[in-house]
Image (cartoon, rainbow, N blue to C red):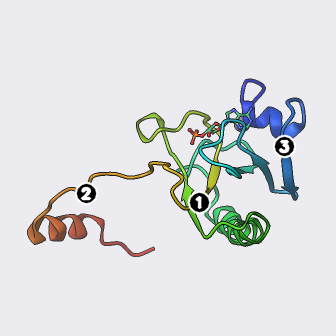
Amino acid sequence: MSDCIFCNIVSGAFSSATIYENDEFKVILDRFPANEGHVLILVKEHVANLFEIDPDKAGRLFRLAALIAREMKTRLGFEHMNVMQNNGTIAGQTVFHFHLHLIPRYENDGIQIHYQPLELTDAQIEAMRKKLEMQL
Ligand code: AMP
Ligand code: ZN
């Protein structure tokens, strides 16, 4: 997709600060980071989001995320991390090419990544559980 920023980064047409690459994934620094050391794991193939990515590839991506996160923690000396992945505009996705955010968290960094929980009854939880109970 020639008009996709991340396809252009994957192909090398646009520059990126790349820290790791294999045949399926490219790992780069976010150009507009939420915090120091904010990393993005890009899938090389153009797929928009979690609803499109091959589930086995998503599994390999998360394996890579675990390896990269540990290496980042050792090198940067932080203790905590948010892993974020947005799917669709309502969910805050701005680049429609699958990517996983790894965001290091430092003491008193002031970064806000949170939501206000809904207050639900046990009956509402059970109604939702029934809707979603599944066999895969
Ligand atoms: P999302 O909002 O989940 O789609 O995240 C898109 C991310 O891509 C944002 O965190 C942006 O800062 C980042 N981004 C946008 N353009 C570039 C670029 N050229 N190089 C690296 N990261 C980028
Ligand atoms: Zn793309």
Residue 97, percent from left and from top: 65, 40
* Distance between the alpha carbons at the discs numbered 1 and 2: 24 Å
Residue 77 coordinates in the image, percent (x, y): 71, 68
The picture quadrant where one finds residue 78 is bottom right
Expressed as whole percent of the image width and height from the top left, the position of residue 72 reads 75, 65
Q: Between 16 and 25, which is closer to the camera in this rendering?
A: 16
Disc 3 crowd rating (10 Å Cα; few below 14, some 14-19, many 20+) is few
Quarter of the image holding residue 3? Answer: top right
Q: Is residue 27 left or right of residue 111?
A: right
State yes or no: discs 1 and 2 in contact (Cβ < 8 Å): no
Per the image, label 2 sits on a secondary structure element best described as loop
Q: Amino acid at mark 2?
A: Pro
Mark 1: give few (<14), some (14-19) or many (20+) Cα within 10 Å: some
Q: Examine the rendered structure and indicate whether residue 111 appears above or below residue 58.
A: above
Classify 76 as above or below 3: below
Q: Nearer the viewer, residue 28 or 33?
A: 33
Q: Which residue is at 70% across, 71% downward? A: 63
Q: Which residue is mark 3?
A: 17
Q: Nearer the viewer, mark 1 or mark 2?
A: 1
Question: Is residue 55 rendered to the left or right of residue 8?
Answer: left
For the residue marked with disc 3, what is the amino acid? Ala
| Tag of residue 106 | 1
* Residue beneath disc 2: 117
